[in-house]
Amino acid sequence: MNVKTLGQFIIEKQADFPYAKGELSRLLRDLGIASKIVNREVNKAGLAEILGETGDINVQGEKVKKLDVFANDQFIAALKAGGEVCAIASEENEDIIPVDSEISKNAKYVVAIDPLDGSSNIDVNVSVGTIFSIYRRVTLSGPGTMEDFMQRGTEQIAAGYVIYGSSCMMVYTTGKGVNGFTLDPSIGEFCLSHPNMTTKKSANTYSVNEGNYLHFPDGVKKYIKYCQEEDKATGRPYSSRYIGSGVADIHRNLITGGIYIYPVTTKSPNGKLRLLYECNPLALIVEQAGGKATDGKVRILEKDIKELHQRTPLFLGSHDMVEKVMEFMAKYAEESIQK
């Protein structure tokens, strides 16, 4: 059997980035190493004393899980030790983490990361994940600053996620297609399992937390009703599939087709998901796979970033399904204005 590891694949693709001189390859390798360590702890979470909450509240106002802290520590340590980044932004930290060391003095990159997406599901054995985004720094030297992170999603050099599920899988893009690697525990390596991933242009699955239906905009309510109507010509009604762990929902829709919806609500008027380290990397991956990602009006990757933990609504997935929900959003926004 001809097995291609993540390391081999990265080296083969290094020619796509002649200016990088191997730094990006090593950075992706560092992320892969940290994710293996996190996967090991996730897999034994029920046996080790790593389940439950720390008693702290993070910058997002969310209860911190013990595994959140562990994952955050592992990725920060790996990125600092690798020497390829001058700063790190994490969901778990209020401010950026500048990296000022001898090995990082010539670092060209910054990384924005959600170390453990869906961590509220850890205690009930549901798949969780890591989301990461890589940018070239815009400052000239020294430790990174906030300015290095205030870049649109279109400027991402690479983005990816790791899903810790029935198998551990890393999916990433460098802007030249999407590839997936599954961790083979027998050799401890990520191996290419899903080359050149593409998502269906249209499908029959929608993913949204319908428990918040009453708080959704009219356009989203109307689109959900559209999905539930019977119409043989368009294959409706569609199936509702919602895990409640963003990486898991989006990973499934990437492979089988579908749309993931996380709109504004009356409780979260700016949306709930974070633009920098959740929506931008996921949007780049889905677009590279042939899908579409918007906030209901404009392309996610073209949104300006004004603050580290900025929130946004998200409509992401199969191209035609996102186009359709945008039609509903535009139509019913106009009607509400006319009223």
Image (cartoon, helix red, strand yellow):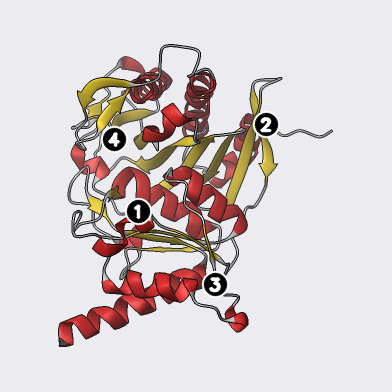
Q: Earlier in the sequence, mark 3 or mark 2?
A: 2
Other-residue count near label 1 (Cα within 10 Å), few / some / many at <14 / 14–19 / ≥20:
many
Q: Residue furthest right?
A: 1
Q: Nearer the viewer, mark 3 or mark 2?
A: 3
Q: Earlier in the sequence, mark 1 or mark 3?
A: 1
Residue 313 seen in the figure: yes
Circle 2 is placed at which residue position?
5
CA distance for labels 3 and 4:
37 Å
Residue drawn where x is 29% and y is 17% of the image: 101
CA distance for labels 2 and 1:
28 Å
Residue drawn where x is 49% and y is 60% of the image: 287
Q: Earlier in the sequence, mark 3 or mark 4?
A: 4
Tag shown at residue 237? 3
Is label 1 in contact with label 4 (beta carbons under 8 Å)? no
Circle 1 is placed at which residue position?
153
Circle 4 is placed at which residue position?
91
Other-residue count near label 4 (Cα within 10 Å), few / some / many at <14 / 14–19 / ≥20:
many
Q: Earlier in the sequence, mark 2 or mark 1?
A: 2
Residue drawn where x is 54% and y is 72% of the image: 237
CA distance for labels 1 and 3:
34 Å
Residue drawn where x is 49% and y is 18% of the image: 46
Residue type beneath disc 1:
Gly
Secondary structure type for disc 1: helix
Q: Nearer the viewer, mark 2 or mark 4?
A: 4
Other-residue count near label 3 (Cα within 10 Å), few / some / many at <14 / 14–19 / ≥20:
some
